[in-house]
Image (cartoon, rainbow, N blue to C red):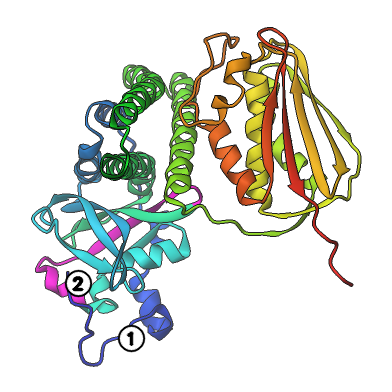
Amino acid sequence: MIATAQASGAPGNSKADIPAELLREVVTTEVLDSRRSRQPNHASEAAALIELAEAMVASPDAVLDKVANLAMQLCGAGSAGVSVIEETEAGPVFRWRGLAGRFAPLSAVTLPRDFSPCGMVLDERTTLLMDQPVRIFPYIADLKEPIHEVLLVPFEREGVPIGTVWVVAHQEAKQFDSEDARVIGSLSRFASAAVQLTDLRRDAERMAVQNAKLNATLAETNRQKDMFLGVLGHELRDPLSAISMALHALNKQAESLGMAVPARDIIERQVAHMVRLVNDLLDLTRVSAGKLQLREERVTVRQVLDRAIELSQARLTAHAHSVSLTLGDNDALVLGDPDRLGQVFSNLLTNASKFSPAPGSIFVSSEVRDRHVVVRVRDSGTGIPPDRLDSIFNMFTQLPATAPAGGGGLGIGLAIARQIVQMHGGIIRATSDGIGQGSEFTVMLPVAEAPVR
């Protein structure tokens, strides 16, 4: 790790310690708009994105190095990299997890989270251009390569900034422009997805090792693992294949920007789908590791259900499903995390839509009974076999292939919903008269006392 000790007379170890005049001299992002920007090379960019999409399917571990290499090539930089936050015993640091160019041999380097160019970018949550950043961060001199300019673009996971993609100009003759910032922004989306997939796989491998040591039913564990990996591969392959095809079309049509827009729309939709799947899997790892945290507050049932309908609206609209809402007490309060409770009922609404023919209605009702708020979500869909009413809340459980078009999934939504409900001191259960008879999910949560005024 590069030492963080400051040179004599250098700025301190936080942004607050940096003189404002020096900060303005080093952080020069505004010049991106005034510099003459090079013309976009859509053919090269499309080819690069296709290469990344194929790598996401074939070898996710190599994607970050590819991102760095393509960033360097497309921007004409001397070095490029991907920095990701990592927790250590000494505190959070940025680890270089993808490298290219003159910095490529420095794969073991980490930089401090709280006092580094990447840290400043994540604090600002915006693209930054820096001129000779060694003037603020003296330890950069230990890299033994001059940094004339560095352009950094942040990327996020679930709305939380976790890293940056950056390019470096080692010579004064090279200056970055707004087109470079746009290109790096496109590459940063792949960096975010690759980090999540790689971390998820490492978590899954760690869990598998623990299960192998602790679980006497190793054969069943292996069977579930194989099923999970098969479903995961299927669910991720389709959107990524669509990305590859769309990017191929974009490459062919690069001379006509108007024709390239639909292909880019496909990319956006399919990447969003992939991110949703990854987020579900990340919730699964948190639940399994006991790391799912709740931010509790008093919230009305109406607020929770309105949030759930909002989260599910795109799916409901796409499949022509309406929600009929009947509330026995609009002001009934529960003590819980509104976002997580919204996730529970959004999962139930999505599940009802998935297994119901279109068009149709989903019925949601609530009442207060025995100091509990009781919420029911009922549909007239394909129903649940009697012998599956309990097992559908198990991880990776899939119902028989009776869902209308648009079904599928990883089989973890109901399992996560049950865990969240139990963390709130409640229970969830399913009832159904059988195949073709629809289903009803009931959630019971303790009533919260109104705050004393």
274 vs 381: above or below: below
Is residue 208 left or right of 268 when viewed as pictured? left
Q: Residue, x 67% and y 20% (percent of image)? A: 353
Magenta range is 139-159
The quadrant in which the N terminus is found is: bottom left
Q: Which mark is residue 82?
A: none
Give whichever of 11, 417 is nearer the camera. Answer: 417
Disc 2 to disc 1, how far (Cα)?
A: 14 Å
Q: Is residue 400 visible?
A: yes
Horizontal and vertical percent position of residue 249? 36, 17
Label located before the other in sequence (2 or 1): 1
Q: Quadrant of residue 116?
A: bottom left
Which residue is disc 2 drawn over?
Answer: 140
Q: Which element type, helix, strand or loop, lies under badge 1?
A: loop
Give whichever of 203, 145 is nearer the camera. Answer: 203
233 vs 428: above or below: above
The quadrant in which the C terminus is found is: bottom right
Q: Quadrant of residue 106?
A: bottom left
Horizontal and vertical percent position of residue 199? 32, 45
User: Which amino acid, by three-letter code, is at mark 1?
Assistant: Gly
Crowd rating for badge 1 (residues with CA inside 10 Å; few <14, some 14–19, many 20+): some
35 vs 13: above or below: above
Q: Residue, x 17% and y 53% (percent of image)? A: 79
Residue 144 falls within the magenta-colored stretch: yes
Is residue 338 left or right of 187 when viewed as pictured? right
Q: Is residue 38 visible?
A: no
Which residue is disc 1 drawn over?
Answer: 12
Residue 255 falls within the magenta-colored stretch: no
How many callouts does the rendering have? 2
